[in-house]
Image (cartoon, helix red, strand yellow):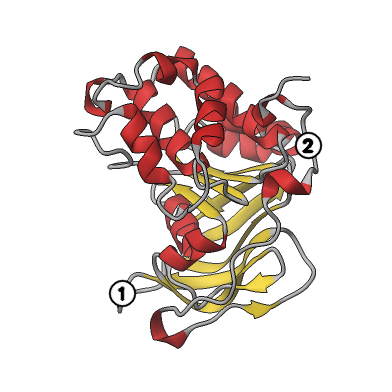
Amino acid sequence: MSQNPYHDDRGNKDASITKRHGVGEIPTRKGGKSRPAPGGPFLIGDAMTGGYGKGPDILHDCTVSVDRGEIAVIVGPNGAGKSTAMKAVFGMLDVRSGSVRLDGEDITALSPQDRVAKGMGFVPQNNNIFTSLSVEENLEMGAFIRRDDISGTMEQVFDLFPILREKRRQAAGELSGGQRQQVAVGRALMTRPKVLMLDEPTAGVSPIVMDELFDRIIEVARTGIPILMVEQNARQALEIADKGYVLVQGQNAYTGTGKELLADPEVRKSFLGG
């Protein structure tokens, strides 16, 4: 068996990899604190309704979740609220009703920074790397919350994305789009996250690069790390998904396994091109 945890069997439940025991209570915005909330999926945005600032609600009783070792994908038409649901789970907009729970804790009141400290790794669609820094420096920035030796994790990232080892001294802004995405995912993995959240990881890349990125995402999930992902390439994403959510106008329209949604005639007709 490889020494790299990203190459172990699919669905590995090794708790040492997923870092089950997070940090202690952390001061948050609005005085918020996490609260025990046992039971349910490892990560869930439960019945979320909310929007940005004082604007109208974009999400309406929306629920998305993912368990250890799973890949859960959020798909739907443009403007369906997919990225908004992801940002709500990460604390980037107000959840006016509903809750977000991570590994048995209610983290609805926590800021995004505090959610990172609790074990959430988030890769936004845009502006997700430091273009003027080298690949290696980007990865080092990803480990900013750690105080231990990060060299082992960096080697695991290089094993997962061999091209990054080759280009470790090169400015990240000089890389191709697919290579930049690898840097962004690798940087998130440097935190040793309990859960990895990816917003449109294959946006703007070629089909070949998309397939390669999906292969690497599967390898990460094999370690037991849950992955929650928003994707425009719905058919391809559902093919690797354990669980899928189709959103329409900020609401759950269809939920099921990836295979179930791919086989559903209404889903195929409305969202997958027949």
| Extreme residue toward the left, this view | 132
- Kindly report the distance in space between the C-alpha atoms of the residues bearing marks 1 and 2: 40 Å
Precedes in sequence: disc 1 or disc 2: 2
Residue pointed to by mark 2: 11
Locate the N terminus and report the quarter of the image it occupies: top right
Image-quadrant location for residue 273: top right
Tell me which corner region of the image, top left, top right, bottom left or bottom right, holds residue 164: top left
Image location of residue 133, percent across then percent down: 24, 34
Residue 205 visible, this orientation: yes
- Residue 249 can be seen, yes or no: no
Callout 2, which amino acid?
A: Gly
x then y, percent, for residue 223: 71, 36
Q: Give amino acid for label 1.
A: Gly
For mark 2, does the 10 Å Cα neighbourhood hold few (<14), some (14 to 19), or many (20 or more) residues?
some
Q: Please, what secondary structure does the residue beneath circle 2 have?
A: loop
Quadrant location of residue 61?
Answer: bottom right
Q: Residues within 10 Å of mark 1 (few under 14, many from 20)?
A: few
Residue displayed at 32% across by 23% down = 177
Q: Which residue is mark 1?
A: 55
